[in-house]
Image (tube, helix red, strand yellow):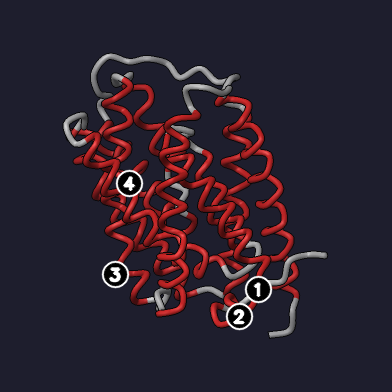
């Protein structure tokens, strides 16, 4: 049976949703703990059972709490030049996502989320085939590239908490030390998550009910992050990412199909 989207009011009466939410939170926690990239699957997974904006609203409080921990851990390993180049674009991307969410029907947002999910999954699957050229210093257009990458990251992050691909495309060629790369990513997305708050509030994505659900899963999120940090040293991370990316690809296809059905429904 194809999952049917549920309103926030129906969430507390849908046991299956709580199981899906738990799986999504575990994936997100493992991503924060060291399995970089797999967290992209969390919001689309929830969006297959409710609307995309509610899914994003449920995950944001959890992300904000996790951000405090990881920013503290990496606060001294940050390339602030990259942050200054990307953050103005991040704000522009969040604003663009807000305009999209207020100007188009629900199925359009679901379609965008589905397409982003599929493209990210395909991008992950081809990671081993691509070679990112190294470069010394910044390109002449580095400031513009940073702004554009920040805009793309802010937009996809606001739609689906899925900002890493544009960030990685811009930052990886700089060949930053591993800890500096991680610290810069952590600080950038922590800032973008804070920038999302006003638009999420304006869209009415936080209610007493959804906040209670988010708070309910905070211990699981933090525990999953700790488990991720422990597991990443003991299992094949690449195989694990492949499994999660395959799930993401399937969920993205489901979202696109649901959007197509929604587009054809009488309005």
Q: Are marks 2 and 1 in contact (CB under 8 Å)?
A: yes
- Foreground disc of the pair 3, 1: 1
- Foreground disc of the pair 1, 4: 1
What residue is drawn where x is 37% and y is 14%? 134
Which residue is identified by label 4?
Answer: 189
| Rendered location of residue 90, percent (x, y) | 31, 51
What residue is drawn where x is 62% and y is 55%? 114
Residue 80 higher or lower than 176, as above or below: below
- Front position in the image: 42 or 200: 42
Location of the N terminus by quadrant is: bottom right
| Mark 4, other Cα within 10 Å: few <14 / some 14–19 / many ≥20 | many
Q: CA distance from mark 2 to mark 3?
A: 25 Å
The disc, 2 or 3, on the residue closer to the chain's N-terminal end is 2
Disc ID at residue 244: none
| 29 sits left or right of 243 in the view | left
User: Mark 3 falls on what kind of element?
Assistant: helix
| Mark 1, other Cα within 10 Å: few <14 / some 14–19 / many ≥20 | few
The disc, 3 or 1, on the residue closer to the chain's N-terminal end is 1
Which residue is identified by label 3?
Answer: 198
The disc, 1 or 4, on the residue closer to the chain's N-terminal end is 1
Which residue is identified by label 2?
Answer: 10
Residue 62 higher or lower than 232, as above or below: below
Q: CA distance from mark 3 to mark 4?
A: 16 Å
């Amino acid at each position: 049976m194809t999952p049917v989207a549920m309103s926030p009011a129906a969430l507390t009466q849908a046991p299956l949703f709580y199981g899906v939410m738990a799986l999504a939170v575990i994936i997100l926690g493992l991503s924060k703990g060291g399995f970089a990239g797999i967290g992209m699957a969390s919001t689309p997974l929830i969006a297959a059972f409710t609307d995309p904006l509610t899914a994003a609203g449920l995950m944001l409080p959890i992300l904000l709490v996790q951000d405090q921990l990881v920013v503290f851990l990496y606060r001294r390993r940050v390339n602030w030049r990259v942050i200054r180049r990307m953050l103005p674009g991040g704000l522009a991307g969040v604003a663009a996502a807000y305009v999209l969410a207020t100007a188009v029907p629900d199925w359009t947002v679901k379609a965008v989320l589905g397409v982003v999910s599929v493209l990210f999954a395909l991008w992950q699957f081809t990671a081993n085939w691509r070679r990112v050229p190294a470069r010394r210093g910044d390109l002449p257009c580095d400031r513009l590239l940073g702004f554009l990458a920040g805009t793309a990251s802010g937009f996809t992050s606001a739609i689906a908490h899925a900002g890493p691909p544009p960030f990685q495309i811009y930052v990886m060629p700089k060949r930053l030390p591993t800890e500096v790369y991680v610290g810069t990513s952590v600080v950038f997305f922590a800032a973008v998550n804070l920038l999302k708050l006003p638009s999420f509030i304006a869209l009415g994505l936080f209610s007493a009910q959804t906040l209670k659900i988010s708070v309910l899963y905070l211990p699981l999120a933090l525990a999953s992050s700790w488990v991720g940090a422990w597991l990443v040293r003991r299992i094949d991370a690449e195989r694990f990412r492949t499994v999660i990316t395959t799930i993401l690809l399937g969920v993205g296809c489901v979202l696109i199909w649901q959007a197509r059905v929604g587009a054809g429904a009488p309005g």
